[in-house]
Amino acid sequence: MPDPDPAPDAAIAAVRRFSRFYTRRIGLLHGGLLGGPLSLPEARLVYEIAQSGTSTAKALGAGLGLDSGYLSRLLRGLEEAGLILRRPSAEDGRQVLLSLTDAGNQVFAAMDARSAEEIGVMLERLPEAGRRRLVSALEEAEQLLGGAPPAPQPFILRPPRPGDMGWVVHRQAVLYAREYGFDTSFEALLAEIVAGFIRDFDPAREACWIAEHQGEAVGSVFLVNAGEGVAKLRMLYVEPTARGLGIGRRLVGECIATARALGYRRMTLWTNDILVAARGIYAAAGFSLISEEPVESFGARMVSEIWEREL
């Protein structure tokens, strides 16, 4: 029997510690949120009504998970303060629409400006790379705790810059060790491939693309000359945090289109059976499995595969 996992207790402590830190950091322990007249629940209601323009008590309660009695008291207090207005719906007389008054809009605008200013000051203390890491960590935490995934953001494909090749080796070695248990012999192979590409690079017949998302490198692929009219796709990679954006498909598609434009007749690649996501991309791009062989490589057992497609 494996030992009991102590992680839950550590995770609970970590979440509580961060909650205490963040509530103190953004001033939630003060009498009014952001130094204003509203408590946190009141301010959140004002924010939600401002975002929607009009809302209903039912929609607010469902969206914020508030008890109907508690919500009713909060709304009554906002109405008595002259910040919200109730009016019957023209479409459904049973529904009461809630909107901000002019005074409510003024309170919201001041609150929103103070919030942006305080967070801006906090973020200014971080370098650009630190801000990107923070945003990525917050998005991941939100999704892990059941939040909706963020809307897909655009990405670009660009040629490699100084330092990118070392990044490719480092990130693939780290990820494959973490996800598949590969040992350092895989890192050695990556380094050999990259070194050979740099040393023998033929710009008329070969290419490399780095995928960049929100200012960070998140993926890569290589197109190399295998001789006799055959192009080889090598080292397709997408960062875990950038999966689901279509980056892998785009990288493979760019390889195929470029190889065709350069006059290659066929494209080949090597992969293995445990790289399920990559194999799905290859199959969707028109590659077919040509040969396979059980092997023990990089400290793991797998099936080595060769895939090809005509161009």
Image (cartoon, rainbow, N blue to C red):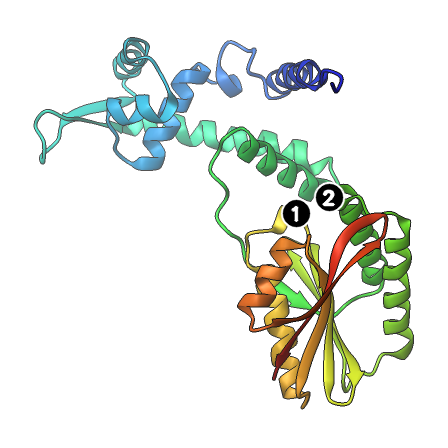
Instruction: Say which quadrant the C terminus sits in.
Output: bottom right
Instruction: Say which quadrant the N terminus sits in.
Output: top right
Element type at mark 2: helix
* Amino acid type for the residue under numbered disc 1: Pro
Q: Is residue 88 left or right of residue 267?
A: left
Q: Is residue 172 left or right of residue 45?
A: right
**Crowding at label 2, few (<14), some or many (≥20) Cα neighbours within 10 Å?**
few
> Residue 190, position in %: x, y?
85, 60
Residue at the extreme front: 294
Q: How many marks?
A: 2
Q: Is residue 230 left or right of residue 75?
A: right
* Amino acid type for the residue under numbered disc 2: Glu
> Residue 30, position in %: x, y?
55, 11
Label 2 or label 1, whichever lies nearer to me, is 2
Q: Earlier in the sequence, mark 2 or mark 1?
A: 2
Q: Is residue 252 left or right of residue 116?
A: right
Q: Which residue is mark 2?
A: 179
Mark 2 to mark 1: distance in Å? 10 Å
Relative to 147, residue 185 above or below: below
The residue lying at 68 percent from left, 13 percent from top is: 9
> Residue 96, position in %: x, y?
16, 25
Element type at mark 1: helix
Q: Which residue is mark 1?
A: 240
Q: Are marks 2 and 1 in contact (CB under 8 Å)?
A: no
* In-front residue for pair 249/97: 249
